[in-house]
Amino acid sequence: MTTLTATPTSTPTRMRSRRTWVGVLIGVLLVVLAVTSLFVGVSDVTPASLLAGGAQSDAAFLLVASRIPRTVAVVLVGASLGIAGLILQMLVRNKFVEPSTTGVTEFATLGMLVAMIFFPGMAVFGKMGVAAVFGLIGTWVFLRVVRFVPVRQLVLVPLVGLMLGGVVEAVTTFFAYRLDLLQSLQQWSLGSFASVMQGRYELVWVAGLMVVVAWVAADRFSVIGLGEEFATNLGLDYRRVVAIGMVVVAVITAAVLVTAGMIPFLGLVVPNVVSLIIGDNVRRAVPWVAGLGAVFVVACDILARVVRFPYEIPLSLVVGIIGAALFLWLLLRKKSRAH
Amino acid sequence: MITLDNVTKRYGGQAVVDDVSITFGAEGVTSLIGPNGAGKSTLFALVGRLIAPDAGRVAVDGMDVATTPSAQLAKVLAVLRQDNQVAARLTVQDLVEFGRFPHSRGRLTVVDRDHVERAIGYLDLDPYRQRFLDELSGGQRQRAFIAMVLAQDTEYVLLDEPLNNLDLRHMTEIMRLVRQMADDLGKRVVTVLHDINFAATWSDRIVAMRDGAVVADAAARDIMRPEVLAAVYDTSVDVREIDGRPVALYYG
């Protein structure tokens, strides 16, 4: 067979070494930011004060009770939300979806409200379970509805999701208003890690577990991302893999909602940035998305704590502003590539 | 052998595939021709277990498609549908590696890598292996998809309109490749083609469908007759002999 006239543009090896450097940079950044996050706050916790006071000091107590839990929670939330977005994008085969543009977050919030109304004394873990079940229903409803939207209508899919989310949110707000629960509702709709403490954040580990599930099943999600016909041809049980993906997305959404509240755009922006750098092979993308997601949220959380020091502004505000800007950039960039 | 026994598929009361019984797999290259809506793609979807028949049975090497585990079928049968839209940003190499999924379940062994390398080499895709699919031309992308089904290493390969949206040169290239796959690698290829001259030039057997039924099934030369083609397409087709080969003229 004759070879084609077009020649490859960039040499693969150079591209790959550049990718390695970006990967290393993300890793280093994550460590630096996480350590910084441990020492940012109103109370004086510094390496020096820790050394001076020893294990019994206030600084050490604060570190263990508040700073470490907060940092761990922030890292896990960032990593898992990115993964939730990545998996959802594979399931829907659309780059513009994430839990908050598909109604999943809104369904999970409704679940929280339901749990609060009917089982007010329920432990947080139980509430998260209810939220996860509602999130699962939300994912299912979205996937059903989206089936009627042609795959190529890239922007229509998230629009449908946003409308769906809007309807569910309206229902939630109505009942919360009638039952005088608006204030509690607001607690979740504004994402923040200010209240994260030892004993009150451990549920994010469940989200972390879902990241591991996503990594183990990574190749299956990649194949699903090729579409049902490819997946069937390759002997994959399409429905089962989609079901696993739905559980991963719903559980992450619920766990994050319970511990930190709503954090918009993250699940959308991070996988898209990673996709531009290394593509959509899920096995390769999982560590990147998790790492970059964590870096993004840790950085935003530090910013939220520093901007109006000694007060905190809600994290969702910082993430929202930066995320929206990044989202716009991605959107305009996509268009310029004539898709 | 791919065997269809009295297979029927209806959409809204209308039979798109109507009581079809046919066997594929004795010849190297078989082409399925026929007008739009004749049921060719539906037939492929039925064989490829993408849809279930309303009546009848489809079997591949004696394995009932409806009851045999999908993973097992994926080792003997590969189906490439038309107009493949892959939204995911995957490199050519990623895609071809996924072709090994039925064998590797995601963990590539030395044997798997060998198959991937051979498929990439066979389709001259080596310079493009690190390119993303959305950075390729239509012909290159089609070759990448074919490399994927080649890596799947199945005896039966079904290609649904592999020439869609390709220019003359790439059409010829793909058909030559299909021929090679049959002759050199022993594959049994079944394709859906719209250009009957391509079908006549490159295939051993042509099956013509119309209104969900098989209306002609013979060696290429016996299908390339004005009366047969007129009956299949419901339009007059002139057939001339050029350099000893039948050529259909249907340009009006």
Image: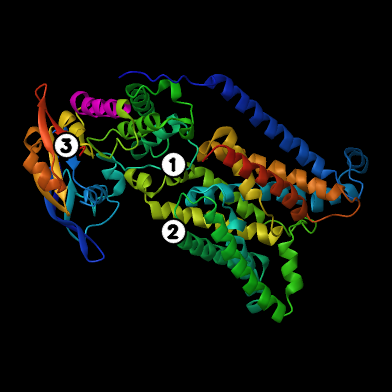
Residue marked by disc 2: A147
Give the CA distance from mark 2 to mark 3.
34 Å
Q: Quick check: A318 above or below B107?
A: below
Residue marked by disc 1: B86
- Please determine if labels 3 and 1 lie on a single subunit: yes
A90 lies left or right of B169 = right
Q: Amino acid at mark 1?
A: Val
Which percent across, then down, holds residue A37? Answer: 80, 44
Using the image, tell me which numbered label, if any, was put on residue B124: none
Residue marked by disc 3: B30
Residue situated in front as seen by the camera: A153 or A239: A153
Reply yes or no: does residue B174 show up in magenta: yes
Provide the major secondary structure of the magenta segment.
helix
Q: Of helix, strand and loop, which one carries label 3?
A: strand
B137 lies left or right of B218 = right
B223 lies left or right of A141 = left
Q: Residue at x 37, y 51 (%)?
A: A237
Q: Quick check: A167 above or below A233?
A: below
Reply yes or no: does residue A193 show up in magenta: no
> Where are the magenta residues, as a range?
B170-185
Q: Is residue A120 visible?
A: no
Which percent across, then down, holds residue B22? Answer: 11, 47
**N-term-proximal mark, 3 vs 1:** 3
Q: Is residue B40 visible?
A: yes
Q: Amino acid at mark 2?
A: Arg
Q: Quick check: A176 above or below B232?
A: below
